[in-house]
Image (cartoon, grey):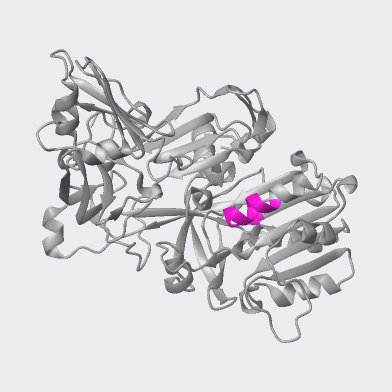
Amino acid sequence: MDETDLRLDGNALAGMLADVFGFDMTVERGGCAGCGATNQLGALLVYAHGMGAVATCPSCGQHMLRISRGPGRWWLDMRGLAWLQLDEQARLPG
Amino acid sequence: MGGFISRGFRGRRRAGAEQAARLPPGQYAESGFPVLTAGPTPRVDLADWRLKVEGLVRNPQEWTWEEAHALPGSSFEGDIHCVTRWSKLGTSFAGVSVDTLLDAAEPLPEASHMVAFCYGGYTTNLPLEDVRGGKAWVVWEHEGKPLPAEHGGPARLLVPHLYFWKSAKWVAGLRLLDHDAPGFWESLGYHNRGDPWREERYWGD
Amino acid sequence: MGRLSWRLSEVTDVRHENARVVTLALQVPDWDGHLPGQHVDVRLTAEDGYQAERAYSIASAPDGSRVELAVERLDDGEVSPYLAGELRRGDQLELRGPVGGYFVWEPDRGGPLLLVGGGSGVAPLMAMVRHRAATGSQVPTRLLYSSRSLEDVIFREELERLDAAGDGLTVTHTLTRAQPPGWTGYARRIDAVMLEEVGWRPGERPLVYVCGPTRLVEAVAGQLVALGHDPARVRTERFGPTGVP
């Protein structure tokens, strides 16, 4: 088994990102800061390490989103996301 | 959901009393060796592999695979602790002591910290005193066999007295600095030093 | 945050689909429904506070406060042996969701529809197929389902019934490791030839959903694109390293 088997996609981050953003982020679109490709976040490749997760651009491999979770807080590094489009329709009822 | 307990769930953990005494706070004993990955496994040809020591040193060094193996060997036997709460007790690694590498490079007086940089882009930072005095290695063998790629092979850094994310997989070199420079996880909420005996897991711990 | 907080469901039934897969039928108070393809996060808590979380696709069609999960017991798993071995009727299970609007199909999205599943990856596709049947949708649909052997196929009888209903759903199996005597179906891993024979032509612009072990999903997605399918119409959900059928 190698990391190919362990690789996931944006679907795996659906719960955590919904917690953080209050949106179903898997349908939202983001632009890669590396190559400019646009993807719904559900289509990003995800390496879900026990310490956190990295979501990468399926076109160029750039880290678009890095997220980790500690007691009572999350940390997010979104330097690899040039832009994020959030559709009001996708906001979770709260 | 305060207080809900899943009837009959214990998870994978098992620890006899003797093991429990060796465990830092919040850890459980794991007999396997979980693979945690934050990216594609780098594939490094041994012919291209280099190990560097650079930055604030008098003699920057670069060893090939053969040259690194010609250095005096050193090994570690003991316990490793992952911040995700598993500890592997009584394991062993072999390679070369970081002391040997630093002695060859001769750190300048102002060097206080280092960053380990790796094939694939991973980084982690350490105070120099945490890798000096027989506390750190670059290893290429685990329990008598070549270190598998998913566990950091061809070679990884080994700093077993700190949480295992400091034992950087696929290490390519050590860069000495006069300041601390947070690495991959340290810039995403994880503690700069990571002492398992003080439970230094996150920022502010 | 309303519907995304952790909540307790009650296990109303535990059905053994085969030697390794169990359907958990859950009753979830105040469930607002879900879309076919979505999943829930499940959380287990031990007495000392230790917690483990995993995601499971909802295999049932939207149906009030009823939710069904298909759980494959992994030999070295931490959560699946509990869900598929210990949990029983009357127990409570903590879950969060539904989440995952990306991997969703509803009849009004149209088709034709190609669903490709490997092993337990058939679970979210079952939600789509069941919802399609429940709403009387006639969207032309082809399900290609890869399993190791006939014993590993889950929902077999139900899929036979749905296939025979004559409402535009065709189910094709491939058994990759062992086939019963007299088997005339596919007996190998999914490849481009099979996808071409079973699936729609690129010119028909199908919507495609691929789910299962990562290796299978990536191989199939690559093959579909190489055959000329529009990548924007191919959605994938990787389950990671479960057994590769």
Identify the residue shown where x is 18% and y is 51%: B79
What are the residue bounds of the magenta stretch? Answer: C211-220
Identify the residue shown where x is 64% and y is 50%: C218
**Could you say which is closer to the camera, residue C64 or residue C152?**
C152
Residue reaching furthest bottom? C181
Q: Does the magenta run of residues contain C217?
A: yes
Residue B131 can be seen, yes or no: no
On the picture, is B60 further left or further right than C36?
A: left
Identify the residue shown where x is 89% and y is 65%: C167
Give the quadrant of the C terminus of chain A: top right
On the picture, is C187 further left or further right than A66?
A: right
- The quarter of the picture where residue B67 lies is top left
Tell me if residue B81 comes above or below residue C21 in the rendering.
above
Tell me if residue C184 comes above or below residue C132 in the rendering.
below
Residue B62 can be seen, yes or no: yes
Count of numbered labels shown in the rendering:
0
**Could you say which is closer to the camera, residue A79 or residue B31?**
B31
Q: Position of residue C209 (x, y in %)?
A: 72, 51
Q: Position of residue C96 (x, y in %)?
A: 51, 50
On the picture, is C90 further left or further right than A71?
A: right
Q: Position of residue C172 (x, y in %)?
A: 78, 68
Q: Position of residue B18 (x, y in %)?
A: 11, 62
Q: Does the magenta run of residues contain C152?
A: no
- The quarter of the picture where residue B47 lies is top left
Most frequent secondary structure within the magenta stretch: helix
- The quarter of the picture where residue B44 lies is top left
